[in-house]
Image: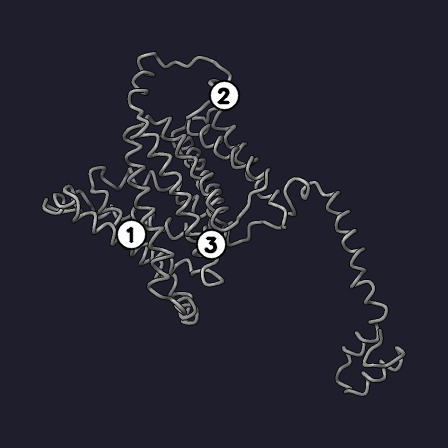
Amino acid sequence: MTLLGSHTPAAAFAGVRTLTNSHRSLQILTKNAPYALPAVVPNPAARIASSTALNSLNPIALLGGAAQDTLGPAAICTMALLAFQYCAQPPLTRKFLDSRVNKKGITMVEEICKMGLSAMFLLSMGKDVVASSLKGWTLQSSLLLAGLPAVLYATQGVLTYLGYQHTDSVTFNGLNQTKTLSAALWCYLLMGKRQSPVQIVALGILVFSALLFQGTISFSSLFGKSDDKSKDAKEEEDQKTSLTLGILPCLGAAGISGLAGALSQKGVQVAGGSGRNPYLYTMELGLYSCISLIISIFATKNGRKALREEGGIFKHWTPMSIIPVVVRALGGVLTALVHKYAGATRKGYALIAGLIMTGLTQSFLEGERLSSDELLAVVFVILSSYLHLSYPPIAV
């Protein structure tokens, strides 16, 4: 094929030169076109054959796909910050927050702080970003995207508290870790986010490592060695664990957690084409959570009783109590950012990393060495992270 309707390359070059003397770069590209095009645009059949041959030699493609599903700087940064928050939360809560404080009062202040932090971060991004984030916003879309997850999170909290009261700690921790698998399942059902076979194995390793680090399971028990628990202690744990009031609520809470996480990820990633601004989305979640808390306080007998007491729902608060509440609110903002840049499934890796950091910090401060199970759990987390990042599903 020739250029500009000419029958020879020379005529084509001359036609281009007559256009203007300022198009020197176009002259060069055109002059080299007859020789460059075959290399740039190869025969389609040859290109397909070459791609197939390369993929057949690539073990990553055989096991899970190309390594294109990598974490960007924003995902890594937000996941690391969420892990630090998860690590810092328990000691701050124990130190500054009285265990007798009203839980609904804590949650309400947390949601208010979450909305305030999100508004501050959103406004700091400039008027153009704010205008772009609010463009097309409607109450109907807000209720659909954030109202339902807010109700789900509230329901999850009730089921978690119920399950914690009617199961032993080993059973509770074990069932609670299934929320990572639940998030992967709901992301697939709602968003079509597939997991490769290797990634499914990696998630299983992650759950196992969490149970191992928390002491829910141990290698000694796996190999059939007897533990030190007496028969009476085991019977007491069995009596404490209830199927209908303990196990089923724990499984329900884990399933709802995955569903709420998948809905949040869908809201901040794909809603409106490019997804909701994570700060705006966090503000919406906080608003609807506050509304549901206010309704529950006035609708329940215990809530109305707390309001009549001296100090109300803020009884047993101190000026320092705000510290763990603000840190937890910051964790809520980070969670929305992790959903935006990494996804609900990979949020599990940030939380497990925070769990390990908590154990390492406590071991350092108290001068205690980590057990062999805890060290193995760290190795399994690293292995799981490598497998999940290196073997994404094959693009179809």
Mark 3 Cα-neighbour bin, 10 Å: few <14, some 14–19, many ≥20: many
Amino acid at circle 3: Lys
Numbered marks: total: 3
**Nearer the observer, 155 or 307:** 155
**Residue position marked by numbered label 2 in the rendering:** 219
**Nearer the observer, 25 or 139:** 139
Q: Pick whichever of labels 3 and 1 is earlier in the sequence.
A: 1
Q: Residue at x 20, y 38 (%)?
A: 100
**Could you tell whether 294 is left or right of 380 in the image?**
left
**Residue position marked by numbered label 1 in the rendering:** 289
- SS for tag 3? helix
**Could you tell whether 236 is left or right of 55 in the image?**
left
Q: Pick whichever of labels 2 and 1 is earlier in the sequence.
A: 2
Tell me which colouring the rendered structure shows: one colour
Amino acid at circle 1: Ser
Closer to the eye: label 3 or 2: 3
**Residue position marked by numbered label 3 in the rendering:** 340
Mark 1 Cα-neighbour bin, 10 Å: few <14, some 14–19, many ≥20: many
- SS for tag 2? helix
Mark 2 Cα-neighbour bin, 10 Å: few <14, some 14–19, many ≥20: few
Image coordinates of residue 93 in percent, x first then y, are: 30, 40
Quadrant of the rendering where the N terminus is positioned: bottom right
Q: Residue at x 70, y 40 (%)?
A: 59
Image height check: is 164 above or below 54? above
Image coordinates of residue 320 in percent, x first then y, are: 24, 46
Q: CA distance from mark 3 to mark 1?
A: 20 Å
Q: CA distance from mark 3 to mark 2?
A: 37 Å
Amino acid at circle 2: Phe
Q: Residue at x 33, y 51 (%)?
A: 150
Q: Residue at x 82, y 67 (%)?
A: 36
- SS for tag 1? helix
Image coordinates of residue 175 in percent, x first then y, are: 40, 32
